[in-house]
Image: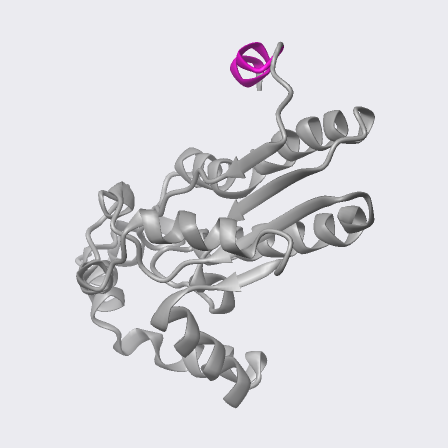
Amino acid sequence: MTPILAATEDIKVQLVFNNAGYISTGLFADTDLERLRCNLECNAGCAVPITHHFLRKMIERKEKGLITFTSSASCYLPGPTATLYSPSKAFLTNFANTIAAENHDIGIDVVVIHPSPVNTNFYKNEGPQLDSLKTAQKAAASPANIAEQIFASAGRLTVWDQGLTCGVFRVVNKVLDYQIFTEVITRFAFLNGDHKKLCKASKTRNEGKSQ
């Protein structure tokens, strides 16, 4: 937070964009714990002190404002092979919704957007390359489109589901109860190509097999 505080010390910030995030791929047990912690902090944890600081400043100055969060369509689903991405985005969505409910009455708007694939450096991910990400990148939208939809949602919607991928995920959640869908993924994840590839390369799983 220190660089952020220093850079905004003499600025009355009324627009806050919690946009930082990346995907770290691999099986959970095979991934270095520090790498997991960094991923969780960037995707979810850092939004807490940033939002807390600037929200308090807005309230103290009795100013209106906008706080936005870039979540993901993945927040609606379990995310094997990229263990912390979906959970961290689910936290971000719920956190944003809670902040929205607390501060709507004083004119501070909160928007959380669930983008479908976006054409950014997101796909230069940390960890093993996944075929599913390569497929998603082919359908990626322009970042400018996401920015436009965030501003269009301000003062109108708290949660904005953007794009076809997000729409499909929502439909799946309507058709199948989340718990049921989780059971389906749990029992059939081993058939996924990325899962097979990671398991084959897993030092943790394969240790001692050749002995």
Classify the position of the N terminus by image quarter: top right
| Image: 46 above or below 133 | above
Front residue of 49/31: it is 49
Please give left or right for residue 47 compared with residue 197 in the image: right
- Residue occupying the point 61% across, 60% down: 157
The main secondary structure of the magenta stretch is helix
What x and y, as percent, mark residue 102?
A: 80, 49
Q: What's the magenta region?
A: 2-9
| Image: 186 above or below 25 | below
User: In the figure, residue 201 lies in which quadrant?
Assistant: bottom left
Classify the position of the C terminus by image quarter: bottom left
134 in the magenta segment: no
What x and y, as percent, mark residue 18?
A: 52, 39
Outermost residue toward the bottom in this view: 175
- Residue occupying the point 44% across, 41% down: 36
Q: How is the image coloured?
A: one colour
Front residue of 130/111: it is 111
Front residue of 89/207: it is 89
Front residue of 147/203: it is 147
- Residue occupying the point 46% across, 67% down: 78
What x and y, as percent, mark residue 200?
A: 19, 61
Please give left or right for residue 134 compared with residue 100 in the image: left
What x and y, as percent, mark residue 81?
A: 34, 59
| Image: 170 above or below 52 | below
Please give left or right for residue 72 compared with residue 64 in the image: left
- Residue occupying the point 58% across, 37% down: 47
- Number of marks: 0
